[in-house]
Image (cartoon, rainbow, N blue to C red):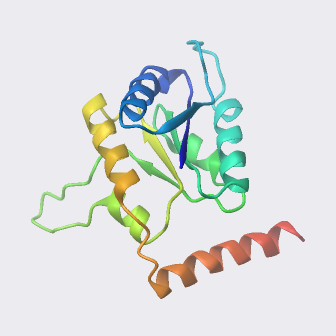
Amino acid sequence: MNILIASDHAGFELKKKLYEHLKKRGFEVIDYGPHELDKDDDYPDFVAPVAEEISTNPKERGIIIGGSGQGEAIVANRFSGIRAVVFNGQYEPKDGRTVPNEIVISREHNDSNILSLGARFLNEREAIEAVDLWLKTPFSNEERHKRRIQKIDNRYVENSEE
């Protein structure tokens, strides 16, 4: 499995750190840019090619990084078969409730194939922990989750052909 990675200017430094971390872990990492810091760059220019590649090669996974990760995920989710999720830190309720780990659920239930990170919300350690957990968590393959993903994919195809 290749890991495709991209960012915008806000995520540029974190992207470099994640790239090095993933290489050290033995992953084949393909950097879609940017390759130099440009405060005026536009995230769709780097994120769309990652999503397009994963759309045609579903065994690949992507990590995209922006200021919040929201715009990047919106771009990625425009491509067929992409299930990009935003992670900006694990929610910890102050009222004593227990909540599931967002990263784990995004893989086990949604089979997310792109992780979108907010560089303005996560420090390097938090981002690395999120990426590592995301990469090691498998899709559950439970029938109900497969059925839901199929409904999303079918609806997308139906709407795109109108």
Q: Nearer the viewer, residue 29 or 78?
A: 29
Q: Is residue 125 left or right of residue 36?
A: left
Q: Residue drawn 68% across and 54% down?
A: 57
Q: Is residue 75 above or below residue 17?
A: below
Residue at far right of view: 162
Rendering coords of residue 146 (x, y %): 54, 80
Q: Is residue 133 left or right of residue 112?
A: left
Rendering coords of residue 126 (x, y %): 27, 38
Residue at far left of view: 96
Residue at far bottom of view: 143
Q: Residue drawn 27% across and 51% down?
A: 90
Q: Is residue 98 left or right of residue 156?
A: left
Q: Is residue 66 above or below residue 90?
A: above
Residue at far front of view: 26
Please state, as top left, top right, bottom left or bottom right, where the C terminus lies in the image.
Answer: bottom right
Whether residue 117 is visible here, answered yes or no, is yes
Q: Nearer the viewer, residue 135 or 86?
A: 135
Q: Residue drawn 58% across and 75% down?
A: 149
